[in-house]
Amino acid sequence: MKLARDTWLIFQRQTQLLLRNPVWIFVGVFQPVMYLLLFAPLLKPALNAPTQAAAYKIFVPGLLVLLAIFGGLFQGFGLIAELRAGVIERSRVTPVSRLALLLGRSLRDVVSLIAQAVIITLLALAFDLRVFIGNLLLAYLMLALIALMTSAVSYGIALKVKSEDALAPLMNTVAQPVLLLSGILLPLTFAPGWLQGVAKWNPFSWAVEGTRALFNGDLGNDRVWQGLGIIAVLAAAGVFWAARQFARSVR
Amino acid sequence: MIETRGLRKSYRSREGRETKTVDAVRGVNLDVAEGEIFGFLGPNGAGKTTTLRMLATLIEPDGGEATVAGADLRKDPAEVRRRIGYVAQGGSTWDESSAREELVLQARLYGISKAEAHRRAERALEAFQLTEYADRKCKTYSGGQRRRVEIALGIIHEPKIVFLDEPTTGLDPQSRAHMWDEIRRLRTEGMTVFITTHYLDEADALCDRIAIMDHGEIVAEGTPAELKREISGEVVIVGLDAPSTPRAAELLDTEAYVSKLETVDEGGLRLYVDEGATAIPQVLRRLDHAGLDLRSIELHRPSLDDVFLTKTGRSLRES
Ligand SMILES: Nc1ncnc2c1ncn2[C@@H]1O[C@H](COP(=O)(O)OP(=O)(O)OP(=O)(O)O)[C@@H](O)[C@H]1O
Ligand SMILES: [Mg+2]
């Protein structure tokens, strides 16, 4: 009960501050829309897709997973600013739940990601993408879990390294192989065997395949529950670890 | 209210390849009574902040025991947190929030209901004369206004004890005096106030009791008056012309209240006495009886800096 209340308090504050800064909202929507309008048209010929809608079915889920990963991974920067301002220390001397300090923030990241995802999905509908609503909601669940995990991990690392200078290269180094090995931009079906073998070890490649299956109306595909399962376990582990960082001494 | 025994903390920091250990706090014993303003006086790096952060549950002590507001620091830090307020040395407000938002959130983090949180924020804003700027973003505040917001945040939940780490550093003399009044008001409301400072006058004027800290250890503790008395007593400086000085020295040397007497080269005496206030009239009477003219008489009371000097061999003003 206390956890829920505290989480809500932190979430409310973080969301309020986010909404106060319209630049973020603009950037958050503008970038994916550019991908959708400027990059996706290349895909129909590149993927040999029969129609534009078929190309979107492959590309849009990848784009959404990409946003979930990156949106989450870079949240740590905001936390470092809060750390520097003394806001985190101020929270830590109150009896507020340490898990709530994390969950409130991660929840804001999840909600803003889902808002982004809805905008992109609506736009893609205009380009003849068709998805069954139940499948779409499951896909959103996958995205929410991914964002929860990556933002929690990013917060945890931010609390450990405590400086932007260390966080930026670290996150880029993590993000790059994750991105390349997940078949986000192009499906890994085009990849040589060894690359597919390596990608099997990347949890996000399972998530991407699962999300694509959902967009394809293929609910029975094993990748759906496998992807959801893997990501759910990782998200729980990430949250557990990051909450411990909040509980431990800061600075 | 606060009782610590042998509180210790060392930091390990890396310098190039070597790891160095800094013993920031080495065995601090403190007893702070309810309802007093307790001051922690010491130069930069003495370990004041480290001690405060331990007592506020922000860092775990390497050794020692402490009871804060009746709760055991090691066994029940959560209970300690409920009973204390803490205002950090380096600030704690967010640029993009307003004072009112910060106050309401802070109160709610302590489990206070929304309506009550708004009432308390309103009261705190008034008490700290912030009403005028209450709804402006914190980044538009002056240093002094911002410091007042931070202190208001530290006491919004009406804790039993509030720790204020250098509450007046960076304030102009007027704001400082004002802050002292605020802190005294907290005491009249029954709060125990624990402040750190490296201002001698602040420790002297504001604090009921002080502990002087240096290199992680407490070198002296007591009321400012006690500490000063303990040091050297007081000095009465008698101004005389050179010819009458030897005669006066002869007369006064035998007086019981003079513990030590020094002759000043160009004429005059320094008398070390227990209490100047009672010594001066007697000196005057004695010299008057002997028909000696005195040019001036001065009383020099030892300052806290003298205390610091005797205890550490250094002056706080210089360090
Ligand atoms: N995180 C840390 N890592 C390594 N050393 C530290 C750390 N924090 C403090 N120290 C060292 O511990 C000692 C005590 O520091 P502390 O901040 O408690 O001093 P202080 O009395 O508050 O000084 P000031 O008046 O400057 O605020 C200093 O020598 C400082 O360099
Ligand atoms: Mg300090």
Image: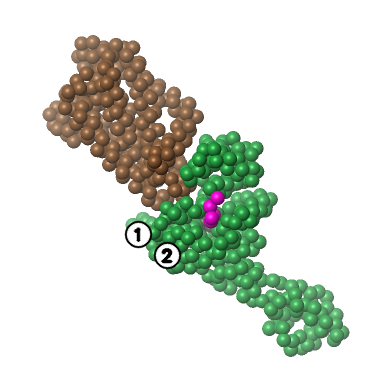
Asked if residue A200 lies left or right of residue B147, the reply is: left
Which residue lies under the disc numbered 2? B65
Asked if residue B263 lies left or right of residue A62, the reply is: right
Which residue lies under the disc numbered 1? B18
Give the quadrant of residue A103. Answer: top left
Find residue A89 and report its horizontal and vertical position in percent: 46, 48
In the figure, the shade used to draw chain A is brown
Q: What residue type is labelled 1?
A: Glu
Against B165, is A60 above or below? above
Q: What stretch is highlighted in magenta?
A: B158-162
Q: Residues within 10 Å of mark 1 (few under 14, many from 20)?
A: few
Which quadrant does the C terminus of chain B fall into?
bottom right
Q: How crowded is mark 2: few (under 14 residues within 10 Å), some or many (20 or more)?
A: some
Q: What residue type is labelled 2?
A: Glu
Identity of the residue drawn at 71% across and 72% down:
B300
Q: Which chain gets the green colouring?
A: B
Q: Can residue B261 be seen in this view?
A: yes
Number of marks drawn: 2
Identity of the residue drawn at 29% across and 32% down:
A146
Task: Give whichever of B107, B102 is nearer the camera.
Answer: B107
Disc 2 chain ID:
B
Task: Say whether mark 2 is within 8 Å of ligand 1.
Answer: no
Task: Give whichever of A176, A89 is nearer the camera.
Answer: A89
Identity of the residue drawn at 64% across and 74% down:
B229
Identity of the residue drawn at 39% across and 64% down:
B63
Gap in Å between the C-alphas at discs 2 and 1? 31 Å
Secondary structure under badge 2?
A: strand
